Image (tube, grey):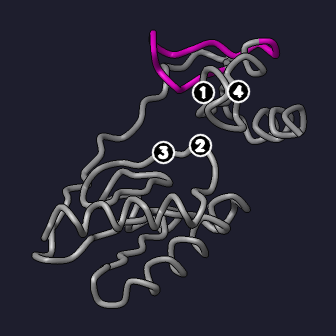
């Protein structure tokens, strides 16, 4: 698949490929794999890896424009998601179901990260925030874990 992506990028006149990959076993995009096939890390501790065949600068992530907007007395979930990833779609279903279980105590705000207006406004890829705190499980968070975080936040409000 990666070879096909590189061939298509070359065909379209692009000067390289960039991926968002992680060290360790945090996610399914292991940086070690990309390093073995010719990618290099853009900056130390960066999650961006590149493979270039033409003269071009290094890519960078857009600055994040997300700002948490609390709702008094409510747990707020801000979820940036894209439909292209099955893990993200599973995560969305879990988040929706668990949010509904708490009724009006939870506000779920969904943002389609693949929508150009959302991408431009927030500079955000897929991300989950609960009361403004980023949550990363590295996979679709189990419903019980989501419930636990929400219950904990609600107890802190009492």
For image coordinates 81% across by 39% down, the residue present is 5
The image quadrant that residue 75 belongs to is: bottom left
Sequence-wise, the earlier of marks 4 and 2 is: 4
**Label 4 vs label 3: CA separation?**
16 Å
In magenta, the rendered stretch is: 36-50
- Residue 30: numbered disc: 4
**Label 3 vs label 2: CA separation?**
5 Å
Q: Are marks 3 and 2 in contact (CB under 8 Å)?
A: yes
Does residue 53 appear anywhere in the picture? no
Q: Nearer the viewer, mark 3 or mark 1?
A: 3
- Which secondary structure, mark 2? loop
> Which sits in the foreground, 129 or 81?
129
**Label 4 vs label 2: CA separation?**
11 Å
Sequence-wise, the earlier of marks 2 and 1 is: 1
The residue identified by callout 2 is 138
The residue identified by callout 1 is 22
The residue identified by callout 3 is 136
- Which secondary structure, mark 1? loop
């Amino acid at each position: 698949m990666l070879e096909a992506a590189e061939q298509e990028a070359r065909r379209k006149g692009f000067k390289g490929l960039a991926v968002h990959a992680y060290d360790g076993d945090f996610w399914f995009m292991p940086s070690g794999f990309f390093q073995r096939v010719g990618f290099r890390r853009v900056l130390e501790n960066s999650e961006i890896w590149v493979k270039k065949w033409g003269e071009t600068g290094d890519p960078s992530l857009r600055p994040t424009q997300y700002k948490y907007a609390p709702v008094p007395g409510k747990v707020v979930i801000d979820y940036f998601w894209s439909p292209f990833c099955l893990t993200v779609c599973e995560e969305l279903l879990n988040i929706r179901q668990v949010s509904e279980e708490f009724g009006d105590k939870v506000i779920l705000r969904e943002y389609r990260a693949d929508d150009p207006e959302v991408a431009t406004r927030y500079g955000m890829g897929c991300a989950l925030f609960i009361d403004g705190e980023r949550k990363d499980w590295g996979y679709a968070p189990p419903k019980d874990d989501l419930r636990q975080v929400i219950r904990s936040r609600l107890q802190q409000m009492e």
